[in-house]
Amino acid sequence: MSSRDQILTAVAQNQPPLTPLPEVPTFQLEAPDLVEKFSQVAVGIGSRVFRVKGYEEVQEILFHDFKANHRIISRVPELSSFADATLLEDRNRHQLANVDLAIVEAHFGVAENGACWVTEEVLGLRVVPFICQHLAILLPKDRLVPLMHDAYASIGSAEYGYGVFIAGPSKTADIEQSLVLGAHGPRTLTVFLMGQ
Amino acid sequence: MKTEPTKDHAALAHRFNQDEPRVNWHDETLWFIREKRDRAAFAIPDWELLRETASQIKFHTLSNLSQYLAQFEANAQANGITVHWAADAREHNQIVHSILQQHGVTQMVKSKSMLTEECHLNDYLEQHGIEVIDSDLGERIVQLAKEPPSHIVLPCIHLKKEEIGDIFHMHLGTQAGVADPQILTETARQHLRETFLTRKAALTGVNFAVAETGEFVVCTNEGNADMGAHLADVHIASMGIEKLIPRRADLGVFLRLLTRSATGQPITTYSSHFKMPRPGHELHLVLVDNGRSVQLGREDFRNSLKCIRCGACMNTCPVYRRSGGHSYQSAVAGPIGSILAPNLDMKKHADLPFASTLCGSCSNVCPVKIDIHNQLYKWRQVIVREGYADPKKTVGMKAMNLVLSSPKTFTLSGKAGRWFMKTVPFLVSNKMNPWYKHREMPQPPKESFGEWYRKNRKPHE
Amino acid sequence: MTVGLFIPCYVNQFYPNAGIATLELLEKAGVKVVYPMRQTCCGQPMANSGFEHLTKDCNELFVRNFAEFDYVVSPSGSCVLHVKDHLHSEKREDQAQAIRGKIYELVEFLTDVLQIEQLPARFPHKVGLHQSCHGLRGLHLSQMSELVAPTFSKPEKLLRLVQDLELIPLSRKDECCGFGGTFCVAEEAVSVKMGKDRVADHLQHEAEFITGADMSCLMHMEGILRRQKSNVKVMHIAEILNAQEIG
């Protein structure tokens, strides 16, 4: 018998009598203002959060820290004047190691934990939000959901090859529980909450 | 390896306690994490309902596991994932090795996977000429120190920053005496970036696998799993068969609980959902049994398989905090390790269910409500019944039973010298009375309660 | 109402005053109390060591001693929890089950059954309350610090009825003391370290007495206090609730 069949047989023999699968109860977030809650939590986990009206403001803020000689990539068409999208192909993925700033659009954000949901199709390449030195996420502020349950309700049965919740810059506290931002991924995360 | 398998938990814990300031430091560091967990949990008014829901989902999954495994396999294959099945650790290691061989790979980068620790994958691959670099910072540190992780979430929580500085000085060329976590982390970042960019194969663990979609989720703070997986040509993910959950929506429950329980964060920095291979590349998933189907058949112990590996039971355990992870000599230490390990090797791990005061704090912090302390009690009964208890202890217990089941002997032995202190010390092999080493004996009163009662009340014989 | 008084083996042998105070508290509340002379032990030391199968004789004896009473009351959370969870009888299982339903730890008997609202006790000292684990997490004498649930504490409620008693706070309000039955000798190093740390928390908050509903934990901490030549004393909660220092 193959290991597969052996395992499945043993599991079928040993599993307890069927118990019901509970429906996930309806949970509520006690904070009424999602933008406020999201911002507060995101800052708490090390993100920078800016409320902006449009792309010009995004550029203005980013240009405080980044100059023309920095390598900036993005697939967002409105940012094409200063961000490059041409190298975002799988065979070039290792060449992204010197990207200073990547800017991506998120599908939505989660107020309770400051996380943003992005998928392969908006990233172009899966490695983009990890390999860059700094990451910026654009998030329409009317696309905030309260809790993770709402997040998965939003995702529904959507198809994607890869998707990731990103909550803050890459971090570690493995050395004596001292928090250090910038472990292997981005050293900073800037979230732009977009909209009037 | 610094651990010596001939010593039991008590002996290794005794050694750990030779340096009391260090025990204090270890205890306080972990208690700090327990407090962070408390703050995160108390910020959610429905926390207990969330735990109960998670527990029921996990138990339901176990009760239907064979069907969910088949469903998951079919969906994962439809997504383009290559699914492998490993009955035990050896087969898991062989599968990983053969995938690497097919791609001519001799160097692999690996993110955190307690399963591969359980299977001793690194040793196996190194014996077969394959170099493995662990990319989680804590795991890389213990790998350089040639030690196993001492905690499932915080692998090097037993090491001080100065010791890590020494390790980095020796292996990564930092200046002697540098112990600043910022500098050490930056050094590791540069070193591991080079690794990520040059490895053709990456192995990751799995936190959750969703039966209805055939996807799996990996949670990290560092981004190391993603750096490895997205840059390599081949991604191998290893998971125990108990990692399944039925629905994508169930992730909402578990991702809320996991990191709040583990570190007090609202969620890990990255919760990565792998559903299909990267276009043009291979994604292999190894489903591992290694004793899990046996544990599933143990009625008293099967719900240990609900575990989502958050480590909260370790952080709250007053024994773990004061004995250190290495004293458990098991890939998973602490309370949960003590109920998982005897299933894998009862003789080797017969000491672990006794490394507890049965205080019950572990069961209360467990996000999936595993009754850990009750299972520790039950494992004790099994271990004694199966003959793995110290024979001296058995003799002592039988003597104790004789005294306690006969009121006459009990009264006599009490008068002869307060039996308790006389009885208990000979349950262990120490020649010296272990109570008295650091504690005064209770002072025998002039009369027992029974004697007082006989004089002062009308006895009811 | 007749209460069968169960005095655990080590309390009988080493801490008769805790037993006497328990008896007197119950009698003062108007309860008829009987102490069956042939009692020994609940069998927990064996069962927690993995030898539950050896406790049959102990169990039979326990059932014979206590079946007849309306309630069984004991000044030990740990022993009560053991009986509640594990008492069986081959000959008289119905009686064993009945005992499991009517056995109470002293504090819960005073608060839940007798519903004591007043005590004529005075104890003008700073007191630290040790929450023994089996009473806390097994019998739910107080809310557990891990759970997101409303707080309450039955022993604290009773201690607050005692005149001039000052209850001190603790940094870790319900951490285990490390006694753990045979753990106290089998894992001597960790047991002692846990005990030292628990005692230190009380000392830092200037306790003069450490009290609790389980004498075994107090015995362990007393052993450490006396080795440290500390003036701080341990005292079973029954003795404080029954204290007669009327000034």
Image (cartoon, coloured by chain):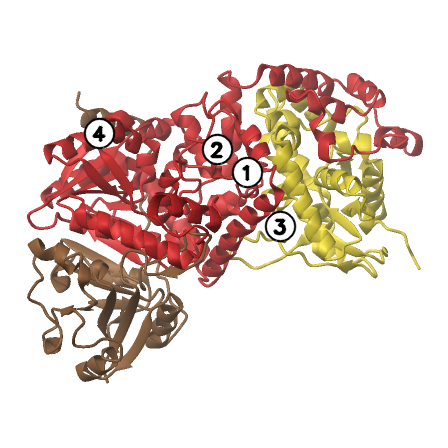
Residue picked out by circle 3: C174
Left or right of C127 on screen, residue B17: left
Q: Can residue B233 be seen?
A: yes
Chain assigned yellow: C
Q: Dot 2 falls on which chain?
A: B
Residue picked out by circle 2: B328
Q: Dot 4 falls on which chain?
A: B
* Residue type, label 2: Tyr
Q: Dot 1 falls on which chain?
A: B
Quadrant in which the C terminus of chain B appears: top right
Mark 4 residue crowding within 10 angstroms, few (<14) / some (14–19) / many (20+): few
Colour used to depict chain A in the structure image: brown
Residue picked out by circle 1: B323
Q: Given contact means CB atoms under 8 Å apart, are the residues at marks 2 and 1 in contact?
A: yes
**Mark nearer the N terminus (4 vs 2):** 4
Give the camera-side residue of B256 and C203.
C203
Q: Given contact means CB atoms under 8 Å apart, are the residues at marks 4 and 2 in contact?
A: no
Instruction: Say the numbered circle drawn on residue C172.
Output: none
Q: Can residue C91 be seen?
A: no
Give the camera-side residue of B89 and C105.
B89
Of labels 3 and 4, the one closer to you: 4
* Residue type, label 4: Gly
Q: CA distance from mark 4 to mark 2?
A: 30 Å
Q: Same chain for labels 4 and 1? Say yes or no.
A: yes
Chain assigned red: B
